[in-house]
Image (cartoon, rainbow, N blue to C red):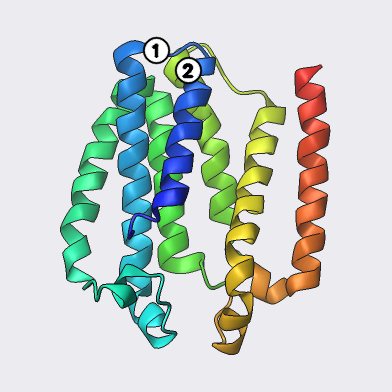
């Protein structure tokens, strides 16, 4: 549960499937899946490690720190192991540039966990990490292959959309607890408007990419 399993699994499946569509296969695809799984696990564990006191104070019973009394110290070793696994497998899967892109994507997510999750800039690591993943995916297939600017923009927008969707259910709790974040700053109505605008941008760019 502390890996934020549904989100982590979704990212693993999407990244692996996208790489396969770009022509990746065999052992390289396995390396990519391992790097992605390790990176996503480290992000989820890092989030719960940092938020443990907040989750307990707000009695977020869906969090393992509350539901199962998971102690932060029990997450330290798994986080370090996941990061140690993620780094070499990123390079094995996608070479130096692609591997570095994945490492920076995970680093960006960890910056969100540690510094930006409760600020108006909470959207930025999502935009950066999702954009970098397009480089990881394309470079895993060929060092000569790069994502188009449209694909990068789509990925960035999807990242922000994911962030807003993830934050909306906790909006009132976060607001009452004086916790920040983009969605808290915007409020529900403006956050929904932002979602509609971003979805329209994604749809428009997808039409261009597919035609």
At a point 81% along the width and 24% down the height, the residue shown is 208
In the image, is 209 to the left or to the right of 68?
Answer: right
At a point 25% along the width and 31% down the height, the residue shown is 88
Looking at the image, can residue 181 be seen? no
Disc 2 crowd, CA 10 A, few/some/many (<14, 14-19, 20+): some
In the image, is 73 to the left or to the right of 124?
Answer: left
Tell me which numbered mark, 2 or 1, is placed earlier along the sequence: 2
Q: Secondary structure at mark 2?
A: helix
Question: Residue 20, which numbered label?
Answer: 2
Give residue 35's position: percent from left, percent from top.
32, 34
At a point 57% along the width and 19% down the height, the residue shown is 146
Placement of 169 over or under 14, stated as above or below: below
Looking at the image, can residue 118 be seen? yes
Give residue 205's position: percent from left, percent from top.
79, 31
Placement of 174 over or under 42, stated as above or below: below
Can you say which quadrant of the picture contains the N terminus? bottom left
Give residue 64's position: percent from left, percent from top.
31, 69
Q: Which residue is tagged 1?
A: 25
State the residue in front, 98 or 62: 62
State the residue in front, 167 or 142: 167
Query: Pointer 2 and pointer 1: residues touching (CB < 8 Å)?
Result: yes
How much space separates mark 2 and mark 1, taking CA atoms? 6 Å
Disc 1 crowd, CA 10 A, few/some/many (<14, 14-19, 20+): some
Give residue 6's position: percent from left, percent from top.
45, 50
State the residue in front, 122 or 1: 1
**Quadrant of the rendered image containing residue 140:** top left
């Amino acid at each position: 549960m502390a890996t934020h399993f549904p989100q982590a699994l979704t990212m693993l499946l999407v990244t692996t499937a996208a790489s396969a569509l770009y022509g990746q296969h065999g052992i390289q695809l396995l390396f990519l899946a391992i790097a992605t799984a390790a990176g996503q696990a480290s992000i989820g564990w890092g989030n719960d490690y940092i938020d443990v006191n907040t989750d307990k104070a707000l009695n977020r019973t869906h969090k393992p720190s509350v539901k199962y009394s998971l102690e932060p110290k029990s997450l330290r070793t798994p986080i370090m192991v996941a990061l140690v696994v993620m780094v070499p497998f990123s390079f094995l899967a996608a070479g130096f540039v692609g591997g570095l892109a994945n490492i920076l994507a995970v680093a960006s997510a960890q910056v969100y966990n540690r510094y930006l999750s409760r600020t108006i800039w909470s959207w930025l690591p999502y935009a950066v990490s999702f954009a970098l993943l397009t480089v990881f995916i394309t470079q895993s297939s060929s060092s000569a292959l790069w994502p188009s600017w449209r694909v990068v923009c789509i990925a960035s927008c999807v990242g922000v959309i994911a962030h807003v969707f993830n934050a909306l259910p906790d909006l009132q709790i976060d607001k009452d607890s004086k916790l920040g974040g983009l969605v808290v700053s915007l409020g529900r109505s403006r956050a929904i408007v932002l979602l509609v605008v971003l979805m329209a941008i994604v749809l428009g760019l997808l039409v261009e990419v597919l035609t």
